[in-house]
Image (tube, coloured by chain):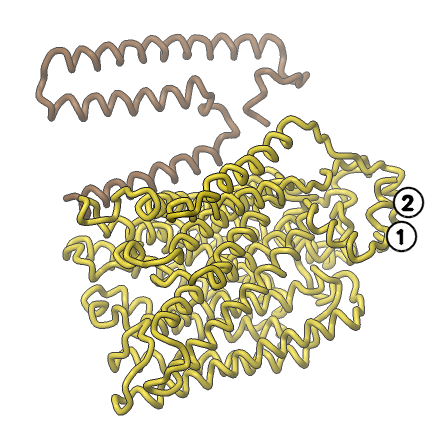
Chain colours: A brown, B yellow
Amino acid sequence: MANLQPNSGDPKVTYEYRRKKHAEEMRMQVITFTMMIFFTVIAFAAVGAGFSKWFIVPFVLLLAIVQVIFQLYYFMHMSHKGHAEAQLFMYSGVLVGFLTVLTFVTIIWW
Amino acid sequence: MSTIAHTQKRGFAGTVWDYLTTVDHKKIAILYLLAGGFFFLVGGIEAMMIRIQLAVPNNDFVSAGLFNEIITMHGTTMIFLAAMPLLFAFMNAVMPLQIGARDVAFPFINALGFWLFFFGGLFLNLSWFLGGAPDAGWTSYASLSLASEGHGIDFYALGLQISGFGTLMGGINFLVTIINMRAPGMTYMRMPLFTWTTFVASALILFAFPPLTVGLFMLIFDRMFGSGFFDVAMGGNTIIWEHFFWIFGHPEVYILVLPAFGIFSEIFPTFARKRLFGYSSMVFATVLIGFLGFMVWAHHMFTTGLGPIANAIFAVATMAIAVPTGIKIFNWIMTIWGGSIQFTVPMLYAVAFIPSFVMGGVTGVMQAAAPADYQFHDTYFIVAHFHYVIVGGIVLGLLGGAHFYWPLMFGTMLSEKLGKITFVLFLVGFHLTFFIQHFLGLMGMPRRVWTFLPGQGLDAGNLISSIGAAFMAVGIIIMLVNVVITQKKNIQVGRDPWKDGRTLEWSIPSPAPFYNFKQLPLVRGLDPFWIEKMEGKTEMTPAEPIGDIHMPNNSFTPFVISLGLFIAAFGAMYQADEGKGWAIPVLIIGMIVTFGAMLYRSIKDDHGYHIHKEDLLDDAGKGGTH
């Protein structure tokens, strides 16, 4: 599996190369982790500052979506190769779920 | 040594035990075929009772209440317990071989899926003997099902819940198998169409069954535990059930018809001796149908008052599905065009399928026009439409597939002569039964009505319809005779019995060795076996040296897990009744059996076994002759 390569015993993948990859990945993880904490602070601040409900709800939802993407791509390694099928099924599932909710809020509980 | 154990002759009890514990996809396929075939006959008997009751006006062959039970069980049995398992039989038998795999990804789960389906179906059908079957239609709309007395609807909800778990497991298993276990060189765009349709249908199962599970749980809670999801008097909304049911139910019809398309896509190239026309557009159309299948469910509910905007959106989306389906129809026609055609029984079914299914598709587009649907809704026109797509598409696919894959599954060839008699009787009977129903519907005969008055212009049409049903019944009986004769004679036909097999499943010896492929085959293009034949070879080029093969052990645990749920379902159902103190203990015992078996499975290490290289080399002289 291509996604396991950084830890594989493949002799073609040199030690130097793997070190570089790991360092890069660590940097990305630290950056995204910082940003996620920052987003959480902003979300709390937005609620605390007492903005209009019509601003806070979509704004916090947006931050949440970005955090989920960070989580999936940087902490759960979906940015690596070999996840095409998983991505396809996750996005299809999200789409189906979204459509269902959209229909329910528009034509059942309008 | 372990190889020898598998080639020994067994007594009857030994064979039964082997099937109860098997995790081999080929044997599970036979189990699905047997169980699905049994439920198909049960559903067929129910259909015959419906047609006898409606043959003449003012008939009193069955009472109105019993009629409701019969139509409900006919629909439920045919969709969930006959069509799906029969397709699962072919998926299990053929798909792993087509992609060059030694088994599915999770053989244990495969067995568990079968036993869950089987016990769910058994539970549902036991309702006939335990106080009355469900009677709210196969859609079980909440306003009817909440008002239904007795335990019929509880049997429906619990039985479908259990068999639905099995189906979901089967679907996930097929997905993982196709993604991970393709032979070297078998890229996605070299997969045979039946594998592709299995893949898309399994993805639809993955997304469509959870809504059904949720809906059924809500129904169970409403009926047994006093909640009010669908109860308007308690602030619920009865339409929510309809949405949940059809979010599941519409993809369900594609789950059924896509594998049937896949079977035809294998039959056409084989007997036209041409590669499938427009392979990539066939794949594209399959995926597109699966995708669009999730955006059209509300077309079943045009008359519930969704409003003109929602109706218009769903009408347009529905009509859009005709485009990829049309692509497929033209591709099939182009495949046989100019081919060197052999009209074997499977090919006859495939050729008859095209016009039959197109007729069902055309009436589908008629109903997709929402204003017109207000006229068609709940009439026999709808009954005619969905029987044209289900019988004209799926059942013809199953019958054609049964003849086509019989040599692969059993090593024998069904009689072509009897097969042709079945085909003619069935096809004539099918059109006789359902074509006239379009007109009965347009003349105003409502669906699910248990009798009608004379002199309203409905007499002749209903009689013709009932005569047609008798033709179909005779056709199926002749097919059963055919099966018995063929298996009694037991003439083994060997490898590649149709002589023109194109895909990997025909390249292995017959009967198939239990490990399928001694060496995984090297796939060099679409229709890999055909490519090798065209280069004068008789076998696939191996992709690996002969080595040890890892095999799973047989297990009785799937049976026990399913049996526990079956027992627990009785407890869950009767616990709401007065004076049935035994129900709660039964529920608990059933759950203990299920979870105990799951715990046993989790704790006990079962690493399977290896077939050693030396045994495989030996085997060439015995079972696996070339």
Output the chain of dot 1.
B
Q: State which quarter of the image contains the N terminus of chain B.
A: top right
Residue at the spot x=33%, y=87% of the render? B57
At label 2, which amino acid type do we have?
Asp
Q: Is residue B37 above or below residue B56?
A: above
The quarter holding residue B605 reads top right
Of residue B80 and residue A11, the one placed in the foreground of this image is B80
| Residue of label 2 | B618
Q: Are marks 1 and 2 in contact (CB under 8 Å)?
A: yes
Of residue B598 and residue B205, the one placed in the foreground of this image is B598
Q: Position of residue B295 (x, y in %)?
A: 31, 50
Output the chain of dot 2.
B
Circle 1 Cα neighbour tier, 10 Å, few/some/many (<14 / 14–19 / ≥20): few
| Residue of label 1 | B622
Residue at the spot x=44%, y=80% of the render? B431
Circle 2 Cα neighbour tier, 10 Å, few/some/many (<14 / 14–19 / ≥20): few
